[in-house]
Amino acid sequence: MDEKRRNKQTLTIVFLTVFLDLVGFGIVLPLMPVYASLPAFAATSLQIGFLMASYSLMQFFFAPIWGRLSDQIGRKPILVLGLFGSAIAHFVYGLAESLTLLFIARLFAGIAGANIATAQAVIADVLPPEKRAAGMGMIGAAFGLGFVIGPALGGFLSGETFGNNHQLAPFCAAILCLLNAIAAIFLLQETRQTSSKRWGSPLNAASWKTALAQPGVPLILLLGFILITGFAAFEIALPLYGKHAYGWSLTNIGYVFAYIGILITIVQGGMVRKLVPRYGETRMILVGFVLLISALVIMALDVSSTFLLIALIPMTMGFGLLSPSLSSLLSRITHQDHQGTVLGLYQSMNSLGRVAGPTMGGFFFAVSTSGLHGPTVPFAISAGLLSIAFFMAFILYNTHQQLNQGESPS
């Protein structure tokens, strides 16, 4: 009973840690495309795509390193270090007076923020396999809540109430990350029982090859990459398209992303907990792709702003089902000693998708607004890419049936 209470406390603290970190992240991210296009920076849509991709490029390289280190030295040091690093990065972002410094701030933020796999590894440490989907959904709900409060707060701080002071949002994000880091030092308990054995370098590829040899792991990593690539292209295209087609302001964009966050929170905080144990991860992955693709096809039709907001419901439901189902299934089929490593590789592939996605979205939006195509081209491209992943998910379904993991049929 004491252990259950201790695990519950740990999960609560991890939830709050991820939530507060994502509030800070959410304050900055949705506003970045318009923020970087201000006269002080004068970034083009393609440069904005590279700016957003730079963050994820660093996560691509550092997520598996932090994950491997968390397997070796424990989860807590990696989480705390990342939070302090994020605070510094947000301060630099707020002080930036050139596009070059914005890029430097985002690169450093990507290095510091590449530790989400460590939080997922904490879930795997304290929960049995059959409850991990709910645990991963809890992290997803923290993401969602962070994007409810973060973008709304960012839009409010950047609005007329505070004299359109665009520095307030990143400064607020930095303070939140700093307070979060201090709280984690005192409240977060270590969940990884490390040994006195001599560990190899986290850059040693041998341990990663061992982890990748497990059936189903490479396919899930590839699906995660395609999912995030398509979704990230949508993320950068939406505010640019909203400003172009509907005249959305920074505040409008912040509220739209808050709306998306509410929907994701409902799905990952409630629906995942009920649906995944009943139907299994692989079925929910198939359903998620159908919802996501359908919504993108609707958006590609150049609909009204009201209809676009309605289409965001199945879109966020699809993504809300896919993300925790993929990470939960990956955790199920991974040995305990490799949880941080494999989940780090998964986040690395997600980060690679966030390099490709914004770059792709920014490029196709620039091309579409030049008059060669309609401005909804990025939505159509994302739908086509995710359609490929949908058929790949059937392969995952068949592979999963052969895994002897003792889980419920899915």
Image (cartoon, rainbow, N blue to C red):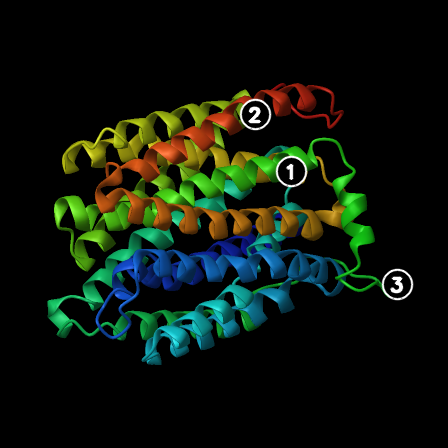
Q: Nearer the viewer, mark 1 or mark 2?
A: 2
> Looking at the picture, how far across and down is residue 245, in whole percent?
16, 44
Measuring 34% from the left and 52% from the top, which residue is drawn there? 147
Mark before the other along the chain sequence, 1 or 2: 1
User: Can you give x and y, in whole percent of width and height, for residue 132 in the image?
Assistant: 59, 39
Pick the residue in front: 266 or 396.
396
From the viewer's perspective, is 200 left or right of 144? right
Q: Is residue 198 left or right of residue 142?
A: right
> Neighbour class for label 3 at 10 Å: few (<14), some, many (≥20)?
few
Residue 48 in view of the camera:
yes
Q: Is residue 88 left or right of residue 215?
A: left
Residue that mark 3 sits on: 197
337 with respect to 266 (left or right): right
Given contact means CB atoms under 8 Å apart, are the residues at marks 1 and 2 in contact? no
The residue sitting at 61% across, 46% down in the picture is 346
Query: Disc 2 marks which amino acid?
Result: Ala
Percent coordinates x, y for residue 404 in the rendering: 76, 24
Alpha carbon distance from label 3 to label 1: 26 Å
The residue that label 2 is drawn on is 393
